[in-house]
Image (spheres, rainbow, N blue to C red):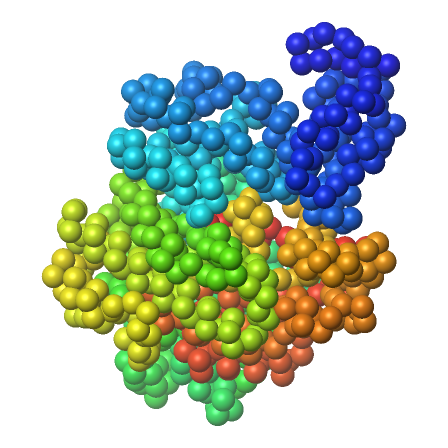
Amino acid sequence: MDVIKRDGRVEKASLDKVTRRIETLAETLTVEPIAVAQKVVAGLYDGIQVTQIDEFVAETSAAMAAEHPDYATLAARVMVSSLHKETKGFIETTEIIGATGLLSEDYLDKVARLGPEIVELIDYNRDFEFDYFGFKTLERSYLLKHHGVVIERPQDMYMRVALAIAPEEISEIQELYDMLSAGYYTHATPTLFNAGLKMQQLSSCFLLGMQEDSIEGIYDTLKDCALISKSAGGIGLHIHNIRASGAPILGTNGVSNGIIPMLKVFNETARYVDQGGGKRKGSFAIYLEPWHADVEAFLDLRKNHGKEEFRARDLFLSLWVPDLFMERVEDDADWTLFSEHSAPGLSDAYGDAFKTLYEQYEADGRGIKTIKARHLMTQIIESQAETGTPYMLYKDACNEKSNQKNLGTIKSSNLCAEIMEVSTADETAACNLASIALPKFVENGTFNFEQLHHVTQIAIKNLDRVIDVNYHPTDKITRSNHAHRPVGLGVQGLADVFFKLQLPYDSEEARQLNRDIAETMYHASLQASVERAKQHGTYTSYDGSPASSGLLQFDLWGVVPSSRWNWEALKAQIAQHGLRNSLLIAQMPTASTAQILGNTEAFEAQTSNIYKRQTLSGEFIIINKQLVKELEKLGLWTPTVRDTIIAHNGSIQDIAAIPEHLKAIYRTVWEMSQKVIIDMSAERAPYVCQSQSLNLWLATPTFAQINAMHFYAWKRGLKTGMYYLRTKPSTNAVKVTVGNQDEDCINCGA
């Protein structure tokens, strides 16, 4: 049986050669190379390419990942080794891609000037630290291709990002490259996609307001959405100002069709204008206040039944909820529905001003319909139980605890419900994101807060630089981004930190660590922003902001921080020098980048200890590596225990052989009280100046449970009370599939 080598030579297939290659790459791993090799050789055929053998070895190893997570690492090493043999390295790759016209002239000039020094900084051995899921995610969407073939290595990608963002000093380039390639933090998906390209669109999130309630305003907004989606941006759009169905149109003496037919057009635009040319689906989140007279039809848009003309299932739905609505639900009072054309200003007001205006319009008889507030809440909860949406965000908390309150009223969040910025008809808010990989800071059984503080400052410095090198799809985005300079730094791998430190997610020690991490990151981000302000000046709209009056996020929450960091000294520096950025911290989902770095997503508790993940990159077995280590120490990682965990859909709670202390540590989110999840979010919140993409999890939700969660989150003062409601499927026909399998929001993907 002949094998065709990379250079075209032909040689005989050999079990020994396959085994030796696997053994070399399996060094330090707990795998059986001969077992992999035997399965591979059994499937070889005459004339097979050596690259196909590598793919076969990788797929075979990955399929054995349920036996031990090291098999997934071996699979990645095989693919990385193959990629290294197929590619030429940073300079040659840049020349090939540059010749296609994809890269910007400024980027190519920078590479030409710094080429030899850059190459010395790159450590290709770091490519071998990815697991298979992470590498395949990179391969599918992130690494640059030529004629459909990947020619960029992961380290080349990180150097491309470092060169695009950092100034020309080699020390700054090296600092950013090392932070990224060693996995301390990562910039968001659009930044990794587009750094160095002619269309260098690096922002993740865009918040649009419907320009005006007219054909011109609606279609101008639609065009902006298309332009943003084309350049790989996720969109949040508020439509409170669009008149309800049946409302008069004076210009034609007709009546409005309302928001539903309009949203059908936005739905098809999201389908047509995908992100980055097929890299990801276009994604729009639509925000509506619950006083809008079309709200009941809005809640049905994603349902799986009903007439198609009233459905828009590719849109993500969100409610922008005033406190007054929650109070009316609590009191079992009436709720009046309006159309803003006849009740102007409702979306502009919040707090007491909103309540006064709303009640005045009720007294004036301007309402279109009056229903019981609880009846509407029932419809909201029914939609959430069926579709997972609408998101629940609390308008008054978002505005009252905002450092942008001097700019106007925040009327929506973004696609992933964690960005809180003012958008107007003239300004489209945007945000540049990154996330800290928290497991990197666990050292010898302790958490290194000083190192976290240091890395956070580096991340904020480079996020601020992103604003200046970024391509902005519209002039409105340029105006907003440069005037207010918001950034969003989040986290990934919080659950992994608790695993490494052997802390149950709901323990008091974990909750304290959660608070300490949030406080450290907020302090460090402000410190970095002060330093940038010293060098480059404050952001344009700084004067009049709460921070300019000495009020930081925890002050707006009425919370006193700990004594871990010197807040008084920092406030004195802010008073003297100001801030470079209006907003700094946002806790976004990190679905794709956490996959790449092998961490649990964001601040989420784990969904399962072992499951199969189906994504656009393929099908992957995901296993809790830390649990496997603990079971190996006790001699309990056996085929019987493994198969029992699979049979229990990734839960270890009913396995008698596993000690109770491990059961407490490795509980899944389905096995926790959602009160704990909300409390953890609320305890981070005084140090999160934007918001958090807070998912809530109920295996079999009831009306009472969902209702109770909403009221608890609202009363805890959260800005985002719920991003998605995650539920379990009614059946588990295929085992190892308990984990979340969709890719609904990798747009923030920090």
Q: Residue at x 74, y 25 (%)?
A: 20
Residue 685 location, x and y as percent? 40, 70
Seen from the viewer's position, the closer of residues 97 and 323 is 97
Q: Is residue 632 visible?
A: yes
Seen from the viewer's position, the closer of residues 597 and 402 is 597
Residue 52 location, x and y as percent? 73, 23
Tell me: residue 162, above or below residue 512: above
Tell me: residue 425, above or below residue 679: above
Furthest residue to the top?
Answer: 9
Tell me: residue 202, above or below residue 106: below
Q: How many marks?
A: 0
Seen from the viewer's position, the closer of residues 21 and 420 is 21
Tell me: residue 618, above or below residue 750: above
Seen from the viewer's position, the closer of residues 216 and 674 is 674
Q: Residue at x 68, y 41 (%)?
A: 29
Would residue 382 appear left or right of 366 to someone viewing this image? right
Furthest residue to the left?
Answer: 576
Residue 79 location, x and y as percent? 65, 30
Q: Is residue 197 visible?
A: no
- Position of the N terminus, as image quadrant, is top right
Q: Residue at x 44, y 52 (%)?
A: 435
Residue 668 location, x and y as percent? 66, 67
Q: Residue at x 39, y 60 (%)?
A: 449
Splitting the image into 4 quarters, where does residue 498 fall? bottom right
